Image (cartoon, rainbow, N blue to C red):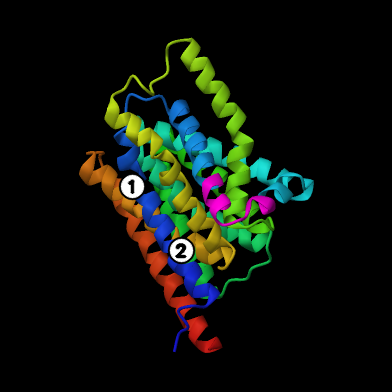
């Protein structure tokens, strides 16, 4: 009988929840069309800081945050991960608002392949023959997509690399999910506040001028940003990095469906060929992982 309270089981639930939330994120950013992407990133940082500090205060964890901030061994990788996630946020928002949801979804289809390779090369994780076949099959699908979408391939590659390396750094940094995320947002906070001051001084700030609905959505950016990242960081500490990479196909699949059926982006021949390859790879990898788990039980 499977222990649903085991670290692997709880990590699995958290991973599925994180990627499902990221999958529906284009709906949120489409609702903010008219607000510059850089300002949206600034709001994500500022409101996340308020929310995360409040949670840490209520849980009595502020001392742990301070210990992280003054420990160079911990804060130096978190500075790098903070910069990577800020770049990832900015590019993703820009892509969604400019009609490139399929290109963004390709980036997150490509990211699991990168995660598997990072897990193999950096963390020493090993895959079975069937799992390597799954990686090759997914890679073939990504190559087909890349050939059919060369003009936007830079978006996909940039998103994949920034988030893949971000996840690797967070997995290797011995800081708790909430403390680590709070430290990251605090690193970015001065830049966000400087941006707000600059936009206010130049009468270009959207907040307060874009309507009550968009102001409310911008304030909600803290919750929308922090919750999936906390779930992701929680899962990454409990699951193999290769497993995290394959579960991630849930997010871009939802994004792709939104781009096609909600926002009317066109599906090319490359998409029609590549996505079945990628979904077949996910099925093969999942089957292999389940069989391996049962043999070890």
Q: Residue at x 50, y 51 (%)?
A: 229
The earlier-in-sequence mark between 1 and 2 is 2
Query: In this rendering, does residue 215 appear at all?
Result: yes
Q: Is residue 34 above or below residue 5?
A: above
Name the residue tied to disc 2. Answer: 14
**In terms of depth relative to the viewer, which is nearer, 61 or 126?**
61
Mark 1 surroundings: few (<14), some (14-19) or many (≥20) residues within 10 A:
some
Residue 110 can be seen in this image: no
Instruction: Please report the bounds of the magenta region as a residue range.
Output: 53-64
Relative to 32, is 117 above or below? below
Image x and y of residue 172, in percent? 68, 57
Residue, disc 1: 270
| Quadrant assignment, res 189 | top right
Q: SS of the residue at dot 2?
A: helix
Q: What number is the disc on residue 57?
A: none
Is residue 58 shown in magenta?
yes
Q: Secondary structure at mark 1?
A: helix
Q: Residue at x 42, y 71 (%)?
A: 284
Please report the residue visible at 41 percent of the width from the left and 45 percent of the height from the top.
Answer: 224
Residue 104 is situated, as x and y percent measured from the top left of the image, at 41, 42
Q: Return the residue found at the far right.
A: 72
Is 105 in the magenta?
no
């Amino acid at each position: 009988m499977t222990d649903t309270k085991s670290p692997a089981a709880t990590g699995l639930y958290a991973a599925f929840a994180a990627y499902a939330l990221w999958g529906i994120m284009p709906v949120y950013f489409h609702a903010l069309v008219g607000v510059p992407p850089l300002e949206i990133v600034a709001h994500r940082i500022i409101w996340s800081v308020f929310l995360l500090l409040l949670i840490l205060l209520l849980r009595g964890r502020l001392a742990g945050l301070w210990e992280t901030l003054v420990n160079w061994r911990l804060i130096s990788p978190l500075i790098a991960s903070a910069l990577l996630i800020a770049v990832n946020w900015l590019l993703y928002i820009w892509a969604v608002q400019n009609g490139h949801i399929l290109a963004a979804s390709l980036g997150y289809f490509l990211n699991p392949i990168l995660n598997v390779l990072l897990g193999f090369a950096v963390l020493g994780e090993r895959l079975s023959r069937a799992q390597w076949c799954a990686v090759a099959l997914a890679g073939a699908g990504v190559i087909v997509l890349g050939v059919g979408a060369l003009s936007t391939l830079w978006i996909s590659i940039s998103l994949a690399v920034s988030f893949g390396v971000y996840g690797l750094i967070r997995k290797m940094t011995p800081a708790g999910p909430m403390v680590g995320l709070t430290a990251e947002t605090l690193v970015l906070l001065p830049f966000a506040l400087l941006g707000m001051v600059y936009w206010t001084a130049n009468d270009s700030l959207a907040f307060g001028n874009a309507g009550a609905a968009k102001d409310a959505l911008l304030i909600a950016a803290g919750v929308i940003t922090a919750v999936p990242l906390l779930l992701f960081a929680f899962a990454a500490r409990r699951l193999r990095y290769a497993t995290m990479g394959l579960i991630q196909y849930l997010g871009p699949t939802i994004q792709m469906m939104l781009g096609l059926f909600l926002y009317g982006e066109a599906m090319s021949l490359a998409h029609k060929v590549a996505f079945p390859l990628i979904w077949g790879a996910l099925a093969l990898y999942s089957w292999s992982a389940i069989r391996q788990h049962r043999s070890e039980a």
